[in-house]
Amino acid sequence: MDSVKKILVVDDEENIRWLFKKALEKRGFVVHAAAGGEDAVKKIQGNKYVLVFCDIFMEGMSGLELLEWIKTHDAGLKVAVMTAQNTMNNTIEAMRKGAYDYISKPFDFEEVYRLVDKAVESESIPAPPMDKVEEEEEFSVKAIVGKSKKMQGVFKTIGKSAMSDLAILITGESGTGKEMVARAVHYYSRRVKKPFICINCAAIARELLESELFGHEKGAFTGAVESKKGKFELADGGTIFLDEIGDMEIQLQAKILRVLQNREFYRVGGKEPVRVDVRVIAATNQDLQDLMARKLFREDLFYRLNVIHVHLPPLRERPEDIPLLANHFLGRFSDELARGKTYLSPAVEQIFKNYSWKGNIRELENAVKRGLALASSGPVLPEHLPPQILEDARKAGTSLEDWEKRLGDLVREYMAQTDWDKDRDLHDRLTQALEKQLFQILLEKTSGKQVVAAKVLGINRNTLKRKIDAMNIQPKKRGRRD
């Protein structure tokens, strides 16, 4: 084995290749760069790499095509895919095809370093062979988007677990998208051509739920005039999604446990067992640990379901995903609810970021729908939002501390992508960038009146004029209203 570890970076953007090369060479790695998939193939054929970083979207051979080629020719080579488009489809497709990990642009190089260290440590562990899967029509799960680390973790878990038949437990508050995640797991599994059956355990009366799940024989109870298949039989070969399983009574939980253990059950009033091949995905918004402590949920069933655990974070814990989701819903419902080009005003975007979203994604979707319907065309304004969101926004406001935190995040993001430790004018460049934006915006708001702008800024007009000339700022004057 080579004493010096080699890493390959594949990206059609030269600055990305340069950033990776500089950052990883500092850590003692030999870094090779390729501008496209075809060039990467040649380099892989002539070198031994510990890790390949590969952009998904490139001219010619795409990143996913390169990933497939690598897994066919060198299954043990680890590939970390990277992209600026933070959709679940990208992540799951990459993980399903055998990607080692997935990182989002703009990069946090501390995360890159951790990923590289992990790859080096596990270099001796061979990657499992990839099974060929038939390509299916794209599944409409684009509402599950997110660039937050928590959601990227969810996407990775879905991608890695979809091809197995292990039970999955999805937890999260109401409205976080648990059913959509279950559908995504089914879509990316080998069972995709078989049924996906969903049942809400909290929405059906307890005395009827057993019959709904397991079916019944003719004459099993009053009104059972003919035999009926239950949801488990209907899902045979596919996936059954038991939503709100925490609301299921404990006697019925024992029958679910039997299906998981023995893959068989009895219809209500039945004498013979019915065998099924079905994957079970369950979800709840309750604390099952608390229910177990109160003897309301079976411990053995919990451990049977919790083989793979997916926790969906509430929207308030991933505020960076709110604009992505809002714009998704805007595009999805514009044709249906609006009569012209519609977009979110900056004020609404800020309100969305600051709102607590107790109803999570479902509440955000409804807010966007209302905004589209009332705005009709043009910008969605605060007045178009539901009253409770406006009231919450008025109470919360936007503090100086929040603004400073966002500014700090931007500075960290900038420094993560630059060779800042070799800079000698970092202060001047960042200060000038901030001043330029401030002067530009203020001059627009004052219709180019430098005397007024200088007074607001608290500086001499000549100082302002000198800076404007140096920065080549051309203020846009407000147009006259007809």
Image: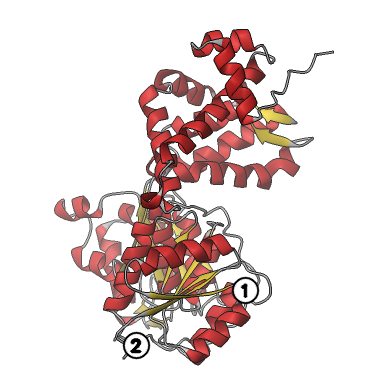
Does residue 200 appear anywhere in the picture? yes
Let me know if residue 223 appears in the view: no
The mark that comes first in sequence, 1 or 2, is 1
Q: Residue at x 63, y 75 (%)?
A: 136
Towards the viewer: 99 or 124:
124
- In percent of width and height, residue 85 lies at 56, 57
Which residue is the site of mark 1?
Answer: 62
Closer-to-camera residue (399/299): 399
Residue at the image position 45 percent from the left and 67 percent from the top:
21
| Disc assigned to residue 217 | none
| Circle 2 Cα neighbour tier, 10 Å, few/some/many (<14 / 14–19 / ≥20) | few
What is the x, y in percent for residue 190?
A: 51, 80
Tag 2: amino acid: Pro
Q: Nearer the viewer, residue 366 or 272?
A: 366
The residue lying toward the viewer, choosing from 287 and 66, is 66
Residue 138, position in %: x, y? 63, 68
* Res 126 label: 2
Q: Is residue 74 above or below residue 35?
A: below
